[in-house]
Image (cartoon, rainbow, N blue to C red):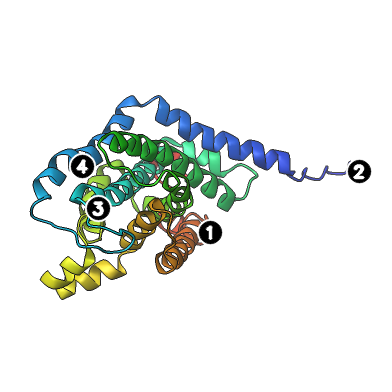
């Protein structure tokens, strides 16, 4: 009787090769889509060059941490615009997941012998790598616009960018399990992205929101995007914000766990919704 050969266990080199392939695929997709790079920069630059100039005289910013002096509005809003880049890139990742699922690409990826959680985290980190390229391009342009945080801030902000990108990307992954078709993505933009962005400290200090609307202030406080923006704001000036750090880390773990569960073929939302058309996973 012929013995059935045992399945070869995946070693560390196989995991590294798979991780590299998934991340590099995301980077190559981004590099081949020049209009995506331009679109990622146009949104924050419009706010920086046009809206910030108009709001400068209306929205004064007092001395609040991490700033040690009065700052111009465009200086205050820059970390929020960095968060905007991360947020919209995360939603772009969600869009690509829906597209890959409709075209069947996701099935090819998810039926591989690698753990599904590892594949999702790899794709998530690929999206974060793309977001970092966009963020530093934006910060470079802002630097020539005389928005100059300490040079060390460009290094200390990196962990904050990665963690915030992971949180928003994990949320986007979970959302991609709910969105069945590309046509529904516009609704997600209207009901998730924009409220999350505007109901935060990205464009105005929380103390001003509290003065105008205590209810909106409470909404901003529980908005995870607010804490991501504050984490980036403090890190950009080489300062630690323990509370935002803990909250962003907690939301990252929660959203990532929800995304992994949702993509579980036996338990998650994918199995409950049934197999999408065109054989997507």
Q: Classify mark 1: helix, strand or loop.
A: loop
Residue topped by disc 4: 48
Which comes sooner in the sequence, label 4 or label 2?
A: 2
Which comes sooner in the sequence, label 4 or label 3?
A: 4
Question: Closer to the camera: disc 4 or disc 1?
Answer: 4
Question: Closer to the camera: disc 4 or disc 3?
Answer: 3
Residue topped by disc 2: 1
Circle 3/circle 2 CB separation < 8 Å:
no
Question: Closer to the camera: disc 3 or disc 2?
Answer: 3
User: What whole-number distance in Å separates the C-alpha atoms at marks 3 and 2?
Assistant: 74 Å
Q: Classify mark 4: helix, strand or loop.
A: helix
Quarter of image, res 122: top right
Question: Closer to the camera: disc 1 or disc 3?
Answer: 3
Residue 244 place in picture, x, y as percent:
40, 65
Identified at 42% across, 62% down, the residue is: 248
Residue topped by disc 1: 266
Identified at 21% across, 54% down, the residue is: 203
Q: How many marks?
A: 4
User: What whole-number distance in Å separates the C-alpha atoms at marks 4 and 1?
Assistant: 46 Å
Q: Nearer the viewer, residue 3 or 256?
A: 256
Which comes sooner in the sequence, label 1 or label 2?
A: 2
User: What whole-number distance in Å separates the C-alpha atoms at marks 1 and 2?
Assistant: 34 Å
Residue 12's place in the image compared with 218, above or below, is above
Query: In the image, 122: left or right of 232?
Result: right
Residue topped by disc 3: 76
Residue 103 place in picture, x, y as percent:
41, 35
Query: In the image, 156: left or right of 206?
Result: right
Identified at 26% across, 39% down, the residue is: 146
């Amino acid at each position: 009787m012929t013995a059935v050969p045992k399945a070869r266990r995946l070693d560390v080199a196989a995991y590294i090769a798979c991780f590299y392939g998934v991340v590099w695929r995301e980077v190559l997709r981004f590099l081949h889509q020049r209009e995506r790079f331009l679109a990622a920069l146009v949104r924050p630059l419009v706010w920086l060059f046009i809206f910030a100039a108009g709001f400068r005289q209306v929205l004064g910013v007092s001395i609040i941490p991490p700033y040690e002096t009065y700052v111009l509005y465009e200086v205050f809003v820059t970390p929020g615009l960095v968060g905007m880049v991360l947020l919209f890139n995360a939603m772009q990742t969600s869009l690509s997941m829906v597209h890959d699922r409709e075209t069947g690409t996701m099935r090819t990826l998810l039926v591989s012998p690698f753990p599904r959680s590892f594949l999702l985290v790899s794709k998530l980190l690929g999206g974060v790598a793309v977001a970092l390229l966009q963020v530093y391009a934006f910060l470079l342009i802002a630097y020539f616009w005389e928005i100059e945080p300490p040079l060390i801030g460009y290094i200390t902000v990196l962990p904050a960018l990665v963690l915030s990108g992971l949180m928003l990307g994990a949320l986007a992954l979970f959302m991609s399990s709910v969105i069945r078709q590309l046509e529904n993505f516009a609704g997600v933009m209207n009901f998730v992205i924009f409220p999350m962005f505007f109901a935060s400290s990205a464009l105005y200090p929380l103390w001003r929101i509290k003065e105008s609307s205590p209810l909106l202030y409470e909404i901003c406080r529980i908005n995870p995007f607010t804490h991501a923006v504050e984490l980036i704001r403090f890190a950009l000036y080489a300062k630690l914000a323990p509370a935002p750090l803990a909250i962003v880390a907690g939301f990252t773990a929660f959203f990532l766990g929800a995304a992994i569960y949702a993509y579980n073929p036996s338990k998650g939302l994918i199995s409950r919704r049934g197999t999408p058309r065109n054989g997507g996973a």
